[in-house]
Image: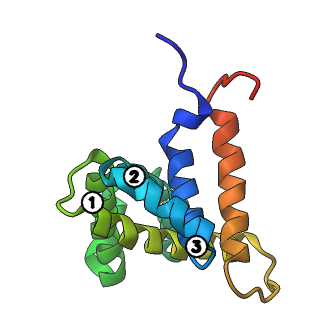
């Protein structure tokens, strides 16, 4: 069996969709986003898995100081005490099910999850900046974080040939 190429990596498709989602004012980006939405089931799974990754890697450690290396007893006790953490873990389960392909309205869920991903990318940008981050308006920080994840996933997807 051949190694998957970087283009076949669903995380890269998810990043491309979210980037087009952020830059929707541009007519070319809007057309590209609508083209990617044609296969809304696949894109919904890809964006759901990317949202699950961001929730585990960014939102839970930044907002709740919860890491998945913590014991489940600690996480469960924190979940019982914090309604916000309970809601976030329910959202995590929704992203996990969406990533597995269990969603009734894939196009609607795809757009809702893309909106959530933009919020998590903004949170990741704020967490990586200095204590006094520069004020940036618009989509520049989100696009910068998407580019960082794209290069990170592009390198980790294995040998992809010389493209």
Residue contact between numbered discs 1 and 2, judged by CB atoms under 8 Å: yes
Q: Give percent across and percent down for residue 88.
A: 35, 72
Residue 22 tag number: 3
| 51 displayed left or right of 41 | right
| Residue 62 in view, yes or no | no
Q: What residue would you read off at disc 2?
A: 43
Classed neighbour count for the residue bearing mark 1: other residues with Cα under 10 Å, few (<14), some (14–19), many (≥20): many
| 131 displayed left or right of 104 | right
Q: Give percent across and percent down for residue 105.
A: 21, 64
- In the rendered image, the vertical position of residue 94 relative to residue 155, given as above or below: below
Residue at left offset 29%, top offset 69%: 108
Q: How far apart are marks 1 and 3 (CA)?
A: 19 Å
Residue contact between numbered discs 3 and 2, judged by CB atoms under 8 Å: no
Q: Along the line of sight, which residue is nearer the eye, 118 or 13?
A: 13
Q: Along the line of sight, which residue is nearer the eye, 161 or 144?
A: 161
Residue 112, picture quadrant:
bottom left
Dot 1 lies on which element?
helix
Residue at left offset 35%, top offset 47%: 42
| Residue 39 in view, yes or no | yes
């Amino acid at each position: 069996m051949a190694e998957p190429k970087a283009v076949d990596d669903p995380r890269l498709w998810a990043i491309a969709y979210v980037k087009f989602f952020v830059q929707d004012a541009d007519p070319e980006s809007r057309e590209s986003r609508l083209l990617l939405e044609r296969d809304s089931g696949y894109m919904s799974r890809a964006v759901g898995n990317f949202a699950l990754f961001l929730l585990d890697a960014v939102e839970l450690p930044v907002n709740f100081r919860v890491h998945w290396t913590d014991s489940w007893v600690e996480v469960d006790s924190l979940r019982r005490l914090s309604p916000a953490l309970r809601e976030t873990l329910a959202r995590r389960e929704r992203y996990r099910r969406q990533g597995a392909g269990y969603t009734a309205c894939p196009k609607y869920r795809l757009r809702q999850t893309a909106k959530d991903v933009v919020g998590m990318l903004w949170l990741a940008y704020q967490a990586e900046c200095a204590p006094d981050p520069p004020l940036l308006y618009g989509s520049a920080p989100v696009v910068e974080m998407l580019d960082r994840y794209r290069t990170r996933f592009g390198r980790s997807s294995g040998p992809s040939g010389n493209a």
